Image: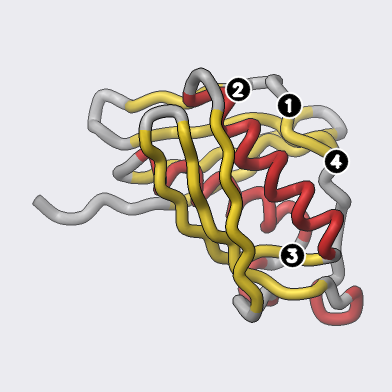
Amino acid sequence: MPARESGWAHFPHGADVGLCGYGPTLEAAFEQTALAMGAAVTEPSRIRPLVDVRVECEAPDRELLLIDWLNALIFEMSTRGMLFGRFEVHIDGNRLTGTAWGETVSKERHRPAVEIKGATYTALEVRQRDDGDWVARCVVDV
């Protein structure tokens, strides 16, 4: 069976930004949703993976785990002044451990488009499709 692809997309939502990640595993969908979030700020190819930051979170269900994951990344972006462009996620039950790779924001090189304030429950969905792939989506406040 050939490997299925992972990817991300934005979807319109008023003044905010909708994020959607998908892939053959739940972890891939979470990684791609984080990449979509970074892409709302700048072109992902502009972000060099110079520094790795470990993130851990736990939540009672997959939807809340997605929100906690994204909000933990937003916290790290804000407090460290960084952007992330590569992610690795491991999920064991309701616990997520992940690593984000990125670098300090350079206004000249990254040309940030927005500042993300937080992940919301709007359009929140984490599910496995009929074809076996996973989809994770929500809206972030900008």
Which residue lies at the image location 37% right of the left edge and 45% below the top edge?
23
Q: Looking at the figure, which quarter contains the C terminus?
A: top right
Q: Is residue 26 left or right of residue 21?
A: left
Q: Helix, strand, or loop for circle 1?
A: loop
Alpha carbons under labels 3 and 4: distance apart: 14 Å
Residue topped by disc 1:
120
Of the numbered discs 3 and 2, the one sitting upstream in the chain is 3
Q: Helix, strand, or loop for circle 2?
A: loop
Residue topped by disc 3:
83
Of the numbered discs 3 and 1, the one sitting upstream in the chain is 3
- Mark 1 and 2 residues: CB-CB less than 8 Å, in contact? yes
Residue topped by disc 2:
124
Which residue lies at the image location 45% right of the left edge and 51% below the top edge?
89
- Mark 1 and 4 residues: CB-CB less than 8 Å, in contact? no
Residue topped by disc 4:
117
Which residue lies at the image location 75% right of the left edge and 38% below the top edge?
17
Where does the image place residue 72, in percent across and percent down from the top left? 69, 44
Q: Is residue 109 above or below residue 83?
A: below
Out of 12 and 46, give the one closest to the viewer.
Answer: 46
In the rendered image, which quarter is residue 117 located in? top right
For badge 4, the amino acid type reads Lys
Are there few (<14), some (14-19), or many (20+) residues within 10 Å of tag 2? some
Out of 106 and 94, give the one closest to the viewer.
Answer: 94
Are there few (<14), some (14-19), or many (20+) residues within 10 Å of tag 3? many
Q: What number of labels is visible?
A: 4
Are there few (<14), some (14-19), or many (20+) residues within 10 Å of tag 1? some
